[in-house]
Image (spheres, rainbow, N blue to C red):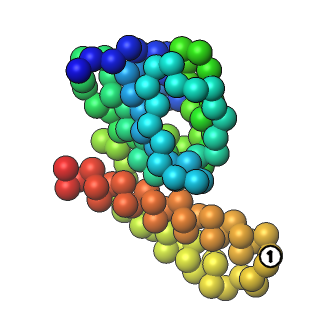
Amino acid sequence: MAHTPYTLEILTPEGLVFSGEAEFISSRTETGSIGIYARHQPLLALLAPTELRITLPGGEHKSFVQGEGYVQVSDERVLVLVEEAIDVKDADAAAFQTALDAARALEQSSDEGTEEHRRAARSVRRYTAFLDVVGTASAA
């Protein structure tokens, strides 16, 4: 069943990653999974690292490894502002594993309660999620 398309933009600090029409997106907020069709209730939500899955008009799917950020839904437009958005086809599992190993080492060597420890824990969470997405993508 075709759904009404809406404008979707995905932005990172490096610039525009995607701009076009989408029928549906799914992601994860800090409170749980979310799916957005056209005419969704206006929303501003904090996004967690996960897979950002887009259904394009015609039924084609596109997936990104998504970092932390925000999603804003208004009228017929959805804006995703995230730290990272990497096309799953371009994701480098080995680089994610290396970054995860370094983050775990830093988390273990830093004092709990320090900013360094919090940043390391955030990186562990991010790269663990990224590896889960890449593992899911390669199995599909």
Q: Amino acid at mark 1?
A: Thr
Percent x, y for residue 120?
64, 70
Q: Residue at x 62, y 20 (%)?
A: 74
Taking the image as shown, residue 115 lies to the left or right of residue 25, namely right
| Above/below status of 38 relative to 118 | above
Percent x, y for residue 22?
40, 21
Q: Residue at x 55, y 77 (%)?
A: 104
| Above/below status of 102 relative to 9 | below
> Is residue 60 in sight in this rendering?
yes
Mark 1: few/some/many CA within 10 Å (<14, 14-19, 20+): few
Residue 130 falls in image quadrant: bottom left
Q: In which quadrant will I find the N terminus?
A: top left
Q: How many numbered marks have been drawn onto this rendered protein structure?
A: 1
Q: Which residue is mark 1?
A: 114
Taking the image as shown, residue 81 lies to the left or right of residue 137, namely right
108 or 53: nearer the viewer: 53
- Residue with the most extreme left position: 140
Percent x, y for residue 55?
33, 28
Percent x, y for residue 40?
52, 25
Q: Residue at x 37, y 22 (%)?
A: 23
3 or 79: nearer the viewer: 3
- Residue with the most extreme front position: 41
Give the secondary structure at mark 1: loop
Q: Residue at x 59, y 64 (%)?
A: 123
| Above/below status of 47 relative to 21 | below
96 or 67: nearer the viewer: 67
> Is residue 20 in sight in this rendering?
no
